[in-house]
Amino acid sequence: MTEKFNLERFLSAQKGLYETALDELASGYKRTHWMWFIFPQMEGLAMSETAHRYSIKSVEEAREYLEHPVLGSRLKNCAEALLGIKEKSATDIFSYPDDLKLRSCMTLFCTVADEGSVFHLVLEKYFAGQLDDRTIESLNSSAATRSVINTRPDISPSNTFKVFADRVIKVGKNKCGDSFAVEFLEKEGILLLVVADGVSTCPCDWKASEVACEAVVRKFKDCQGSMDTRMVLAAGKANNAVRQIGGNCASSITSLTLATWNVNEDKIHFLNVGDSRLYLGPANDLEQITRDDVAPILLKRNGEVVLNAGIPVFMRGVTRSLGQTDPLEFEVQTRPFRSHEVLLLVSDGISKNEAFTSQFDAIVGSSDLQEKLSQFIRDNSYDNRDDATLVAVWRTGTNDMVLGEIERCLQEGIDFRTSMIGQNQILEFIKADLLIKMAEGVNSEVNTTLDYAKKFGIKFDRDFLSSLLSVAISQGTDRLLVTRFRDLIRRT
């Protein structure tokens, strides 16, 4: 059977001890130390290194454990041995706290076994059929975390920001090696953004990136402390999780780009490992704010250095990745995130794509950023030469200070970009303003606003222009304005 998880760690630990454990269970009293790898628990219920090493990370891993021809059979044998013990409680057999670990283990495997399984029977015999609450909570948390991996974010329209996230697979590949996660922790007001790019020369690039994203989200949500502390702990957790990938996917590695934003503040926190990137800035001046962890390395073919006119050929090689054997240190940085700026997290399938980099300004500065980004992803899905992932965040809300500055720009004919106003902010203001002016029939002011939009490259979508055209036609008082709207629609 093909393993997705590193179950070998259990086989190694049980070597020479499984028989001991079974004998002790048959005697009705546990005397030696084997609880963690004979009756494994869900991750996060204990903090020791041993507990972490032998924890089960997901329902999928629990299912694979149970279906394993050796491990699954041994677990059932141990559970059946417990059913044969008479007139003893779990505490009599295991003592505290191992009696709680037994309940946790039985609860975990109940979720992946058929109804009426030996695990259900052990719970009935020793715990009155009651499941372990902490294990159920951990399972629910794990499922919730997986639900945000590679899923387009569902951000409430009431929030003052928008998020776009998508990925495309390299043509000819079966699975995308990139993963992303976007989650808004509403109670804390924190937006969590993750992009991971599994290294394609490794066995399972897709597995490494998925595991990294899941580990980051789960750990960040579970731990306490400052923003920077939580980010470092989350990155460290992801690094360990990737290193523990086993089976045919062992030795897989991935990049990691992690950003967090307290939406009530004007700054972002970020860290980066590998060659995925963060860009930040206004539409016309995006800046890469992360440093690529790369260096030139000799290109070899069949073990021989490749030469060009007698000169060794070098290629760009990544020097830091999650899952590497050498220790990793994580540095969290902060940057201002102002109302007119856009934040982008991209894998190298985007940053190396000339079609995108040449259109940075046009895409990010468009009147409908969401649609432009979607269109770009669709256009490049047919001939993409690498897995590509893009996550974008921008603000849509405006405070009184920004509103006042927008009004001043319109009245004085000042370029809004010099006042640090975002294109989407002024677009939303102008659209609302035009609707009011059309309803009031002040067409001269409508033309003035349209002139401003034309001068500074503010473009409207076809549906909005069509709605204005309908109003102008129904009024029947300004044929020139009707003609202008029709011309704008043709140009859209």
Image (cartoon, rainbow, N blue to C red):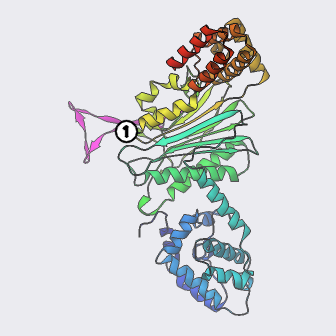
- In the image, residue 210 sits, relative to residue 345, either above or below, namely below
User: Which residue is the extreme one toward the left?
Assistant: 309
Find residue 129 and report its horizontal and vertical position in percent. 72, 79
Going 72% across and 71% down the picture, which residue do you hit?
132
Q: In which quarter of the image is the N terminus?
A: bottom left
Q: Which amino acid does label 1 sit on?
A: Arg
Going 46% across and 51% down the picture, which residue do you hit?
206
Q: Is residue 102 left or right of residue 385?
A: right
Find residue 114 and report its horizontal and vertical position in percent. 58, 77
Q: Is residue 395 left or right of residue 483?
A: right
Q: How crowded is mark 1: few (under 14 residues within 10 Å), some or many (20 or more)?
A: some
Residue located beneath label 1 in the image: 385
Find residue 166 and report its horizontal and vertical position in percent. 52, 41
Check disc 1 and report its element: helix, strand or loop.
Answer: loop
Residue 325 visible in the snapshot: no
The quadrant holding residue 410 is top right
Name the one closer to the observer, 299 or 432. Answer: 432
Going 67% across and 87% down the picture, which residue do you hit?
29
Going 52% across and 30% down the picture, which residue do you hit?
372
Query: Which residue range is magenta in the image?
Result: 289-316
The quadrant holding residue 32 is bottom right
